Amino acid sequence: MGTGTELGRVRGLGSAREGTHHWWHQRLTAGANLILMLWFIASVARLPGHDYATVTAWLSSGWAAIPMILLIASVFYHARLGLQVLIEDYVHDHKQFVLMVLLNAFTIAGAAIGIFSVLRIAFTGAPA
């Protein structure tokens, strides 16, 4: 079998059809981050004080805890998507697999710690 034409050598090596899905997720999380960060900044700015007791009392409300959990999840997922592209574009050897595993572990651990912290405050309530 000969080398054939240039078109014949690259036929079948096209898109893996994952780019659009990844691109949409990155755009959707960017929009969610924008809305949730605006909510967060406005909510914190409206607090009467920024001491521990005030912030804990605010975060113990479901109206604050649920959007905060959504913000944490969205920010970590968005960061994972962006760093995944960076790793895939600039790392081309066996280190790519290791970096992707570390990236996934870091984002899952970071999001889990953040969500656990919010849930702990929300379920234990404000300090007396």
Image (cartoon, helix red, strand yellow):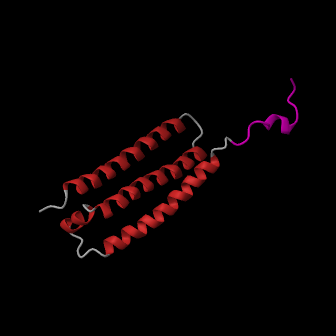
Residue found farthest to the top: 1
Q: 8 above or below 21?
A: above
**Is residue 66 placed above or below 2 in the rendered structure?**
below
Residue sitting nearer the eye, 76 or 9: 76
Q: In this view, does 17 lie above or below 57?
A: above
Q: Main secondary structure of the magenta part?
A: loop
Horizontal and vertical percent position of residue 35: 46, 66
Q: Residue at x 52, y 36 (%)?
A: 97
In this view of the protein, which residue sits in the foreground, 109 or 67?
67
Is residue 60 highlighted in magenta? no
The part of the image, by quadrant, that contains residue 63 is bottom left
Q: Position of residue 109 (x, y in %)?
A: 36, 44
Q: Please state the horizontal and vertical placement of residue 93, each as a whole percent of the image.
A: 58, 36
Q: Give the magenta part as a residue range.
A: 1-15
Name the side, left or right, on which 44 lies relative to 49: right
Asked where in the image residue 122 lies, by quadrant, the reply is bottom left
User: Does residue 16 appear left or right of residue 43 in this picture?
Assistant: right
Placement of the N terminus among the 4 image quadrants: top right
* Residue 48 in the figure: left or right of residue 127: right
Residue at position x 52%, y 50% from top?
Answer: 81
Q: Residue shown at 88%/32% (left/top)?
A: 4
Q: Does the magenta stretch include residue 7?
A: yes
Q: Nearer the viewer, residue 91 or 68?
A: 68
State the residue at coordinates (60%, 39%). 92
* Count of marks, rendered view: 0
Give the quadrant of the C terminus.
bottom left
